[in-house]
Image: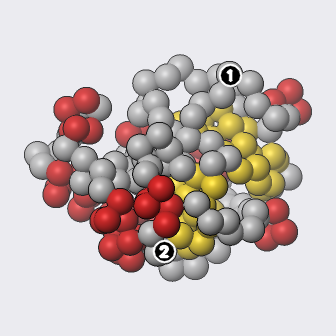
Amino acid sequence: MATFFTADTHFGDHRTLNIHRRPFASVAEMDAAIIAGWNAVVGATDIVWHLGDVARRSADVQGLLAQLNGTKHLVRGNNDAPATGEAGGWASVHDYVELTQDGMLLVLCHYPFRSWNGQHRRSINLHGHSHGKLKPMPRQFDVGVDPRSYRPTALDALLGRAGGGDVEADTLPPASAS
C-alpha cells in the first residue's frame, strides 16, 4: 500500500485546456489521459489524497471515482460544489488535513500557504490550486496534475527519494460528511 497525492484534475472542464494550456486536443482526451496516468501509478490498495478541483460537474464525480484505482480522500477545492464531496466513492472529505508520513507532518489543503503548522519544524505543505505557476517555498509542493505529468505523485518522488513510505494508519482523520 502506497500513498499518493494529486489535485486540479478538473475532469470535464474545457476551460482548463486553454487557461492552463493543457496539451490535449479535447476534454475527452484530457480526461482519458488523467485516468490512464492515475491508474498507471495507483494500485487497488493504494491511498490517494485529492487536494481539490475534481470535476466541472458534480454529477460526473461518482462515475469518475469508480474508474480510478485506490482509496480516495478529498480535500475540497474552490471549484468543488457540495455535491462533489457527497458523491459516492470518497473514503473521507475534508477542507484541511494534517497527516504524519515517514515521521514528517504533512499539511494538506487545496490552497498553498505562506506559512503552515510546523513549518519551522520541517513539516511539508502539499497543495493544488496554482497549476504549477506559483514559485514554491521550501518544503512546499504543488501536487496538481499540471506540474506532475497528469498523474498522482508519491511523497518520495516530491522529495527526490527512492522507495516508499506509507501514512501511519492512526494518523488518518476520520471520514466526515461534507
In the image, is residue 130 above or below residue 32? above
Amino acid at circle 2: Gly
Tell which residue pokes out farthest to the left in this image: 25
- Disc 1 target residue: 114
Q: Secondary structure at mark 2?
A: loop
Q: Nearer the viewer, residue 157 or 6?
A: 6
In the image, is residue 18 above or below residue 38? above
Residue shown at 26% from the left, 38% from the top: 16
Q: Nearer the viewer, residue 60 or 36?
A: 60
Q: Give the label on residue 136, or none.
A: none
Residue 148 visible in image:
no
Residue shown at 51% from the left, 79% from the top: 44
**10 Å neighbourhood of mark 1: few (<14), some, or many (≥20)?**
few
Question: In the rendered view of the protein, which quadrant contains the N terminus?
Answer: bottom right
Q: Quadrant of residue 32?
A: bottom left
* Residue 49, x across and y down, in percent: 58, 58
Residue shown at 80% from the left, 54% from the top: 100
**10 Å neighbourhood of mark 2: few (<14), some, or many (≥20)?**
some
Amino acid at circle 1: Arg
Query: Horizontally, is 171 left or right of 61 in the view?
Result: right
Q: Quadrant of residue 65?
A: bottom left
* Residue 70, x across and y down, in percent: 52, 73
Query: Horizontally, is 70 left or right of 108 in the view?
Result: left
Residue shown at 74% from the left, 68% from the top: 174
Query: Horizontally, is 23 left or right of 63 in the view?
Result: left
- Disc 2 target residue: 89
* Residue 109, x across and y down, in percent: 62, 42
Query: Horizontally, is 134 left or right of 159 in the view?
Result: left
Question: In the rendered view of the protein, which quadrant contains the C terminus?
Answer: bottom right
Q: Nearer the viewer, mark 2 or mark 1?
A: 2
Dot placed on the residue nearer the N-terminal end, 2 or 1 = 2
Could you tell me if the residues under marks 2 and 1 are in contact, i.e. CB atoms within 8 Å? no
